[in-house]
Image: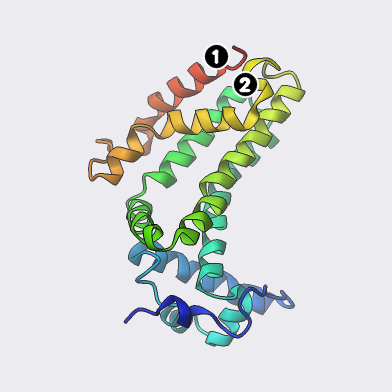
Amino acid sequence: MTDSPSSETGPDSGSTATRASPRGEARRKRQLEVAREHFLEHGFAATSINEIARQAGGSLATLYRNFGNKDGLFLAVMQQEAQTVWSVMDHEANEARSVEEALEDFGMAMLALALAPELIRLFRGLAFESGRNPELGKLFLDNGPKLTRQRLAGYLSRQVAQGHLPSTGLGQEPLAAANLLTGMLLNPLHVDALLGCPPDTASSEQLRPHVRRCVRVFIAGFGA
């Protein structure tokens, strides 16, 4: 039995956890792990916050205190997923690799996440649920795809400032540049996967030629 949206709001809805101890932080991490499994396996609507609390251990009140409600828990999971993609860029930037290499590894990480069967199922469920609850769609976009594009725009802007990318053309519109690159990377692979026709690849590495072409075309036309 699933919980209705109204039953997902606890007494401390919207509050955030006070991370006072390693034990409390470990409990919060476990709650996120279990929530991720449930959201990706069952979708948002069919996920029960009560079942998450039961499997993660601890009380339902603790889960409410950490995340506020079901939407807050979903938001935290989406932010974590976005960080999974972005951690590749952070690492590559720290290693001082070229822009082309950093963007290629970013593209590989993004496609690995976006084309994962469990995330495809989540996308399908969210597309349906968002028709009845637009705020849910906005929550996902703001803390997943949009967050990733905004951080990519920040990275591109820094590369322009450092002279690694042209300051003309897309160099004046970093967010438009980020939207363009992510669109190139995802299409047509993501739409195909959503409609039940995922890429016919034995491993994610077989996507690298597509990613490499997208990045090279993107960089070549960046200053135009």
Q: Amino acid at mark 2?
A: Leu
**Residue shown at 74% from the left, 18% from the top:** 163
Q: Amino acid at mark 1?
A: Gly
Question: Quarter-wise, where is residue 198 in the image?
Answer: top left
**Residue shown at 59% from the left, 12% from the top:** 224
Q: Nearer the viewer, mark 2 or mark 1?
A: 2
Percent x, y of residue 97: 64, 27
Tell me if mark 2 has few (under 14), some (14-19) or many (20+) residues whose alpha carbon lies within 10 angstroms of its own.
Answer: many
> Exactly how many numbered labels are in the figure?
2
Percent x, y of residue 205: 38, 33
Between 142 and 98, which is closer to the camera in this rendering? 142
Q: Would you say residue 47 is visible in this rendering? A: yes
Tell me if mark 1 has few (under 14), some (14-19) or many (20+) residues whose alpha carbon lies within 10 angstroms of its own.
Answer: few
Q: Would you say residue 203 is visible in this rendering? A: no
Do residues under tags 2 and 1 come within 8 Å of each other at their CB atoms?
A: yes
**Sooner in the amino-acid sequence: mark 2 or mark 1:** 2
| Element type where label 2 sits in the image | helix
Q: Is residue 96 left or right of residue 111?
A: right
Question: Quarter-wise, where is residue 121 in the image?
Answer: bottom left
| Element type where label 1 sits in the image | loop
Residue of label 2 = 170
Q: Is residue 172 left or right of residue 212?
A: right
Residue of label 1 = 221
